[in-house]
Amino acid sequence: QRFGGEISPWTALLGLKSTREPLMVAMAAVSGKRTPKKVPPPPGKQTNNKAPLPPKVPGNMMQLEGNTMPRVIDQTRIPIKVYTEELEVDCYKQLLDLANSPVPVGHVACMPDVHLGKGATVGSVFASDEFVAPMAVGVDIGCGMVAVKVKGLFKDAPQMELDKLQRIQKEIKRSIPTGNGPV
């Protein structure tokens, strides 16, 4: 009931009475398991789905603390790296549920276009060792993405020095947060 007040399609499809997290139900269905195994937090780390909410701003938004990117939420089993200053309150709760679940490894990345999704937060990225997460792709794949033609860049590519092309590629990789490891 946490996700828009409706029963998840996965819940109905699997004939379950309710689910705490539609994403978990989806992965349980794909992996052939009814419930995923519990993954304890690292030693000395307490997880808390009821982590204190940052201060609210007008509307259903909340302001995250800090002035560097990414902002890190580390009250969860694995950290959440957030690449925006504000989050919807329900989005924040959905990200906490994901980061405390056994599904992601490493960290959960939260992109600037993040918004509440059905089953998974749209604009979140994570790696998983054991699960396939169809709801993590979502129904609006590619929303917020744009392709921009850079006049003359590729026309001039054969004449460009290799190191200039590598600097462009490195800057693109640095500016667009993706993946689970170093670039």
Image (tube, helix red, strand yellow):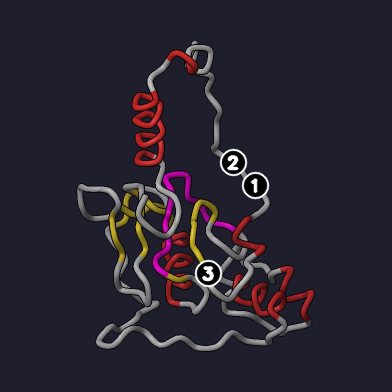
Q: Give left or right: position of 33 versus 47.
A: right
Q: Give left or right: position of 71 versus 97.
A: left
The one nearer the camera, 87 or 162, is 162
Question: Identity of the amino acid at label 2?
Answer: Cys
Q: Residues within 10 Å of mark 1 (few under 14, many from 20)?
A: few
Question: Identity of the amino acid at label 1?
Answer: Asp
Q: Residue at x 53, y 12 (%)?
A: 155
The mark nearer the N terminus, 2 or 3, is 3
Magenta: main secondary structure: strand
What label sits on residue 164 in the rendered view?
A: none
Distance of label 1 from label 2 (alpha carbons): 6 Å
**Is the C-beta separation of discs 2 and 3 under 8 Å?**
no
With respect to residue 14, does 146 lie above or below?
A: above
- Residue to which mark 3 is pinned: 128
- Residue to which mark 2 is pinned: 143
- Residue to which mark 1 is pinned: 140
Look at discs 2 and 3 and give the one toward the viewer.
3
Picture coordinates of residue 55, whole percent (x, y): 27, 58
**SS assignment at label 1:** loop
Q: Residue at x 60, y 63 (%)?
A: 4
Picture coordinates of residue 63, whole percent (x, y): 30, 52
The one nearer the camera, 76 or 125, is 125
Q: Give the image quarter of residue 22.
A: bottom right
Q: Residue at x 22, y 48 (%)?
A: 68
Task: Give the magenta range.
Answer: 106-117
